[in-house]
């Protein structure tokens, strides 16, 4: 045999072996009639193989939901759903499962209603106050696990609208006012969630920053401003997580509904950002067939008013092309393959309650923000304290939660709603059974801990007078569907706090809010702790912080302004009431909404100046700045060195100069060159550093050049403006002891 023949025969033998292996892998993973079950193919290849087998009706069935009780007609198929907000019938003939969607902002919604249980995590804004990317991942992972245990394969969480308007009733579901913080946090939440093989989604795309007239409002904003603010949060979140879904919002944007807005859905999302997943409309946010489809809307929820029979007709008549239809279906299928919901469908099981408690408590402990602590009143000394007055906020039995479609059902029901325990009703505040009073008592067994509801102010004052310390709980309920009229606390809580503080010079205020609030009594109290909507284990976390077992480390993801007069908009624009059909009295309200309500304009003239950027630019003093949060220890910053490059490296030394271990969130801000025409500074990075007393660490924060760039409308892209960049490092947006200017080009 010649040498060349030998090598040829070896080649043949090798090729044969490869073929056998390939065939055996093939037969193991994919039945011959379902080649798309071959997991070695890419999600896009698998989707394409399925698509080739689908009939027109099957394709259309993936394009829409099947109705929602209370919102428009419900199809008979809806009865087969798992009880969530959305249900899409799969293609069972081809092994494509149904999509069961559940709202899952800070936990799985409607569990109680469905006879199940889920953990309530601290609300989303609270989690943003931890600035902790690992915890954000854990947040998403927990929700993902509980969704699967309850039989869901898609989450409708992932809210990331920026806090442009601090009276927006849904800010508690979002991640604050900074696009980089919000985007990076939501990216990790979605990554953690999708790792559990659950489809994720980011919402509400975009500029849905007010609830008033949300189905009618037309937001007017220029391209640069939207790309650098609200849209940037989505861009970063999608880049970091590859989330499967994006929910387009109710509002119009520059004239077109978000769900039929070509600029938003196609030009930016699908083309510029190369989003491969699918766009689903908010519930009732689809308003057309051909226009929405051409603009890039892939899926209508909750029903099939535009994407059912009308879509079929549009395809049959050639108004909408088959290629366009196929693109929508492909996106849905490829997302299902990519996320693993086809290869690893959810198996119903018992939720790990204890595991959920652990995560919820840890996140609550990392997200509460100590706003003020004069004379180091906190932490309380459990060994020495003899009497504590616990006042207000239903703190004897529970802690409040955020409402609307984010609402998680408490086990056993709402602890205070009349006529007693049990009901969780849309439009009514819900308190979770986590009792601050009980947990404070447990921490201070030698103290006399008494409760006053606060309804009777003189009684609360008398209790405060006779106690060493008064802890007043104040709340402000927030919910989908409504904005607050003011930034004030509701009811007579301001009067209660002022009266208690006047009676006892050692007063602590614990806030349970989902937005900033004004504090006319701030000068009278020693300590203020923002506990947000603290979730299933809020009171345990709170007590650990009050008594110093946990050192607070949260920092504000939103500015607390002094008063409404300092906001970019004095009031929130509202629709003419005659233009809004009343769902309680008008049987056609749903169809009228779908067909489109008369619009009214809101101009976001503040543009780039969202949150702290607004107050910075106008030199407006605030109550508490973005990034602010105290600790029971102290930190010192030194040694700043900024090294240009990709990434830019910002290095410094952080020391714990106090007597307790703690975690500091060190923040890096940058002022762009004057020619960039930007607000005074922007957050570009941060690091959360754990330090023992006396310990020092060298820290490096890597800053992506993209985070230093501006959106250039002419070239339709991001650009780094050459010039001098002022880097500043410190514990809050207004306390930045380290500064260095570096030239970048
Ligand atoms: C909300 C969405 C939610 C949907 C389904 C809508 O009213 O705006 O955030 O996911 O309902 O419950």
Image (cartoon, grey):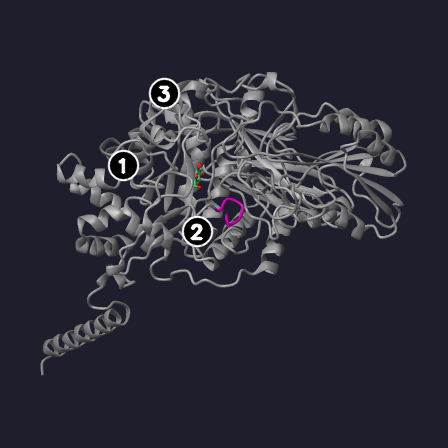
Q: Earlier in the sequence, mark 3 or mark 2?
A: 2
Foreground of the two, 583 or 381: 583
* Residue at horizontal 52 percent and vertical 34 percent from the top: 170
Q: Position of residue 553 (x, y in %)?
A: 67, 42
Residue 716, placed above or below residue 242: above
Q: Kindly identify which residue carries mark 1.
A: 306
For ligand 1, which image quadrant applies? top left
Kindly state the secondary structure of the residue where label 2 is placed: loop
Residue 18, placed above or below residue 294: below
Is 482 situated left or right of 27 in this image?
Answer: right
Q: Which region is colored magenta?
A: 104-110
The C terminus lies in quadrant: top left
Q: Kindly identify which residue carries mark 2.
A: 83
Q: Which mark is residue 598?
A: 3
Foreground of the two, 721 or 338: 338
* Residue at horizontal 47 percent and vertical 37 percent from the top: 160
Residue 720 seen in the figure: no
Kindly state the secondary structure of the residue where label 3 is placed: loop
Q: Position of residue 678 (x, y in %)?
A: 48, 22
Quadrant in which residue 313 is drawn: top left
Q: How far apart are the two marked residues, 1 and 2, measured between alpha carbons?
A: 23 Å
Quadrant in which residue 268 is drawn: top left
Q: Main secondary structure of the magenta part?
A: loop
């Amino acid at each position: 045999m010649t040498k060349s023949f030998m090598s040829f025969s070896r080649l043949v033998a090798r090729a044969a072996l490869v073929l056998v292996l390939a065939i055996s892998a093939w037969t193991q993973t994919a039945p011959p009639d379902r080649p798309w079950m071959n997991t070695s193919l890419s999600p896009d290849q698998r989707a394409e193989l399925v698509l080739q087998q689908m009939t027109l009706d099957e394709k259309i069935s993936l394009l829409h939901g099947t109705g929602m009780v209370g919102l428009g007609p419900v199809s008979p198929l809806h009865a087969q759903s798992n009880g969530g907000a959305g249900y899409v019938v799969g293609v069972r003939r081809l092994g494509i499962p149904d999509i069961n969607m559940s709202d899952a902002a800070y936990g799985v919604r409607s569990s109680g209603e469905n006879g199940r249980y889920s953990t309530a995590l601290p609300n989303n804004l609270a989690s943003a106050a931890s600035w902790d990317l690992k915890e954000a991942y854990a947040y998403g992972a927990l929700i993902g696990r509980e969704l699967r245990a309850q039989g869901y394969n898609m989450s409708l969480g992932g809210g990331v609208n920026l806090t442009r308007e601090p009276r927006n009733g849904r800010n508690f579901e979002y991640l604050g006012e900074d696009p980089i913080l919000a985007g990076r946090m939501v990216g990790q939440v979605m990554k953690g969630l999708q790792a559990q093989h659950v489809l994720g989604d980011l919402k509400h795309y975009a500029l849905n920053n007010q609830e008033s007239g949300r189905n009618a409002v037309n937001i007017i904003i220029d391209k640069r401003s939207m790309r650098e603010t609200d849209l940037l949060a989505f861009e970063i979140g999608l880049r970091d997580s590859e989330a499967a879904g994006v929910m387009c919002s109710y509002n119009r944007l520059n004239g077109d509904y978000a769900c039929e807005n070509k600029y938003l859905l196609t030009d930016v999302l699908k083309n510029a950002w190369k989003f491969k997943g699918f766009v689903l409309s908010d519930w009732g946010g689809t308003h057309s067939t051909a226009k929405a489809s051409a603009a890039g809307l892939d899926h209508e929820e909750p029903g099939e008013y535009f994407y059912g029979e009308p879509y079929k007709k549009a395809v049959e008549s050639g108004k909408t092309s088959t290629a366009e239809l196929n693109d929508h279906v492909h996106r849905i299928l490829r997302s299902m393959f990519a996320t693993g919901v086809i290869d690893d469908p959810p198996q119903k099981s018992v939720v790990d309650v204890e595991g959920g408690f652990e995560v919820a408590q840890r996140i609550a402990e990392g997200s509460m923000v100590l706003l003020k602590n004069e004379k180091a009143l906190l932490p309380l000394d459990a060994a020495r304290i003899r009497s504590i007055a616990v006042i207000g906020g239903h703190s004897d039995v529970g802690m409040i939660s955020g409402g609307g479609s984010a609402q998680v059902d408490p086990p056993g029901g709402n602890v205070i709603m009349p006529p007693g325990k049990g009901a969780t009703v849309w439009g009514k505040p819900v308190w979770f059974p986590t009792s601050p009073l009980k947990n404070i008592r447990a921490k201070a067994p030698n103290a006399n801990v008494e409760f006053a509801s606060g309804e009777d102010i003189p009684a609360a004052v008398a209790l405060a007078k006779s106690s060493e310390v008064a802890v007043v709980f104040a709340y402000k309920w927030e919910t989908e569907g409504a904005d607050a009229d003011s930034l004030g606390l509701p009811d007579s809580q301001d009067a209660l706090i002022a009266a208690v503080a006047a009676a006892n010079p050692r007063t602590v205020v614990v806030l349970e809010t989902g937005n900033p609030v004004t504090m006319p009594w701030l000068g009278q109290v020693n300590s203020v702790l923002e506990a947000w909507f603290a979730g299933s284990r809020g009171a345990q976390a709170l007590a650990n912080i009050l008594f110093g077992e946990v050192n607070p480390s949260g920092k504000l993801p939103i500015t607390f302004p002094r008063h409404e007069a300092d906001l970019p908009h004095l009031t929130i624009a509202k629709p003419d009431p005659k233009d809004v059909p009343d769902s309680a009295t008008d049987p056609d309200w749903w169809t009228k909404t779908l067909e489109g309500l008369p619009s009214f304009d809101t101009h976001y003239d503040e543009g780039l100046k969202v949150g702290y950027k607004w107050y910075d630019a106008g030199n407006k003093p605030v109550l508490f700045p973005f990034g602010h949060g105290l600790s029971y220890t102290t930190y010192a910053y030194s040694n700043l060195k900024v090294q240009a490059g990709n990434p830019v490296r910002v290095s410094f030394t952080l020391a714990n100069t106090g007597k307790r271990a703690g975690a500091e969130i060190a923040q890096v801000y940058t002022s762009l060159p004057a020619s960039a025409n930007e607000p005074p500074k922007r957050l570009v990075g941060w690091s959360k550093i754990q330090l023992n007393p006396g310990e020092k660490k060298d820290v490096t924060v890597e800053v992506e050049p993209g985070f230093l760039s501006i959106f250039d409308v002419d070239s339709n892209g991001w650009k780094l403006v050459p010039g001098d960049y002022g880097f500043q490092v410190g514990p809050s947006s207004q306390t930045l002891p380290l500064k260095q200017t570096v030239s970048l080009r």
